Structure formats: C-alpha cells, structure tokens
Amino acid sequence: MRLEQLETPALVLDMDAFEQNRRLMKTFVETAGIALRPHYKSHKSTAIAKMQIEDGAKGISCAKLGEAEDLVFAGIDDVLIANQIVEPAKLARVAYLANCCRLTICVDCADQIEALEKEAAVQGSTIHCLIEYEVGMMRCGVDTPEAFIALAHQLDRSPHLVFEGIQAYAGQLSHEEDEEKRRAESERVKKAIFDLRDEVQRSGLSVKEISGISTGTVEFHTSGSPYTEIQAGSYLFMDTAYGALNLPFQNALYVAATVMSTNNSTIIVDAGRKSIAVDQKMPVFKDFPDVPVGVSEEHSSITVPGHAARLGDRYLLIPGHCCTTVNLHDHLYLLRNGKVEDRIPITSRGKSN
C-alpha cells in the first residue's frame, strides 16, 4: 500500500527521519552519560515505547495513570509518572500497579505522601518517589530547599515509599526561540539543582535520580549536568514549534491530507483542527513551508498563485504540536519511500485520567 492509497486525514511517520532522530538521541545520551527516560505523551504508542527501550532507554516517562497502566500491561517494567496523583481511587490503582513493575511517581506535598503511603501499605507495594522542584514553570512543585527537604525526610520515614530524588522539568524553556536566553536559563536551572542536591545530601539523604530535560534543552547537557535522566519526547517526531529552534532533529511526523477543493489560487485539504493540533503553532504544508495556513474544524487551506494542485492530490502537513496531534488519531502509518510498512495503534489515545 502506498501513501496515496490511504484514506485521509491520516497520521504518518517518515521512518528514515524517525530512525535518524533515534540515532541522534542515542549518540547524545551515550556521550553525555545521562540515561534516557523518554516521555510517552509524544507518541502514546506502546510499540514505539518498546523501540525506545530497544534503543537503550532505561524506562519510560508518562503523564497519566492510564498511560502508565497501558505501558505496564504491554511489558514495560520501569515507568515514571511525571505528575502528581491525588484522587483516592487513582492512588489505589497506583499502589496496585507498583506491584507489577518498578513504578515512580512525583509528589509535592505532605498530604499526598501520607495518602500514598496508606494505599501502598494496603497493597503491600513499594512506590518510588521524586519530589518535584519548581524551576520556573510555575506549575507543580515545592519552591524552597527547606520544603523539599521536609518532604524528603517524610518519604524516608514512610515504610512503603522510597525517596528517589528530584523531578525538575523546566518546561518553560522547551520552546524558547531565543537560543541565548534558553541556554542562560538552562544554566540557571542547573545551578539551582546542584545547590538543592547538595543541601539534601547534607541533610543526610541520598539523591539517586534527578529527572527532567526537554527536547529543546537537551543540547545544553552534553557535560557537567546534574541530571541523571532525560525526559524528552518530541525529538522522535518534531513539529513546527520545535522547528523554530533549529535543533538537529528532523521532521518525521505528518498528517496526510487530500485536496478536496481548489478555488483560484487556494488549495483546500481535508485535515483541520480535529486532526491536526494548533495549540502551540500553526501547521505548515511540507511542500509550501513559508505559506501561512488557514485551519478550521475540517479543512486547512493555503493560497498559492499558479498552483498545479488537482482534486485528490495528497499533501503532507507538519503539525504545530506533535504530542497533541498524535492524541487525535487512532493509528500511525509507518512510511518509507512512500510505501506503508506498518500501521500501529495509538494505544493510549484519549487516556487523560
């Protein structure tokens, strides 16, 4: 089967670019001496997660309990939920899942730790914990070393919980287009993490893991980094938001669309907001990367005077945001030289709980 035979909109993956991105990241982590724990939210496919493990990833990061369950039930035995979970029913599921794999979860308050310990005691499981430290994203996490150390000692006193270390994801830098600002802020974050690690260790506890780093900042951790794990995910696929940063990774993910109408200078295709995400940047046509795209629910359009597009022609669109685009599709088609090699399910599509 060839690309032009797919019904559209269809999510497609250029395997040559995908494999090159995997090789680049593998070379980086081996050179930097930092383990790769890639983020599942970018592809939500257990098949791709297994490819990453084959590439040498120590485990997989994810954002939601439902994603973690999909990973574990597919045979991934080292999973980090890089997020806080507080609902009682979900904490019971976390405690159960921790008996099925090596499970790590993020915490940032005493009440959450207490509830997590109670559920783990009921299940007789051991849950590894990273304490989230606020490094500028203004989302979750404690914001002082004193608060961090208090939680670390609470974990250390909890029989069924293990204090693993620090979660420090500087997501506010991921898409910073000013390279010097991105680099300078990354250095600030590194210093803050070094300082925190030293204070925690002076309090008598060992910091085994420091987890974070995004696709947009990975190049600043080639040496002298406090981090032990990289949580980057978008490096596999890329998108127009990351494309603005001039990173070494290639666009590999596209939405294939069919020309459904032409109106003078306008080309209109059958992929809109319901099949291609626009939450970070707008998508672009691969063949017309400098032409602004108009996007409605079911259509995307560009104005190209003198175009030669005909009804039924296929175009590839580069998503504005790869992670949220993936979550709009059931399957991913693997392409090489225009031929479909395989179709894999987006296993955790819609798993937001």
Image (cartoon, grey):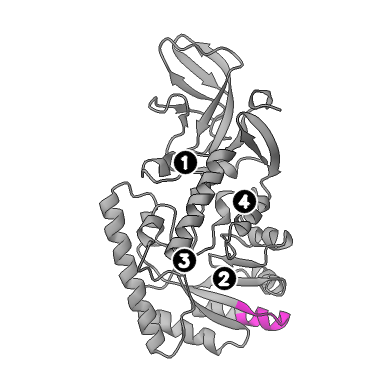
Q: Main secondary structure of the magenta part?
A: helix
Q: Amino acid at mark 4?
A: Lys
Q: Quadrant of the C terminus?
A: bottom right
Q: Are marks 3 and 4 in contact (CB under 8 Å)?
A: no
Q: Which residue is mark 4?
A: 44
Q: Which mark is residue 34?
A: 3
Q: Amino acid at mark 3?
A: Ile
Helix, strand or loop status at disc 3: loop
Q: Is residue 189 positioned above or below 237 on the image? A: below
> Mark 2 and mark 1: span between their CA atoms?
31 Å
- Res 159 → quadrant: bottom right
Q: Amino acid at mark 2?
A: Ile
Instruction: Give the mark nearest the N terminus, 2 or 1.
Output: 2
Instruction: Give the mark nearest the N terminus, 3 or 2.
Output: 3
Helix, strand or loop status at disc 1: loop
Residue 195 percent across, percent down from the top left: 33, 77
Magenta segment range? Answer: 117-127
> Mark 2 and mark 4: span between their CA atoms?
18 Å
Q: Which residue is mark 1?
A: 250
Q: Are marks 2 and 1 in contact (CB under 8 Å)?
A: no
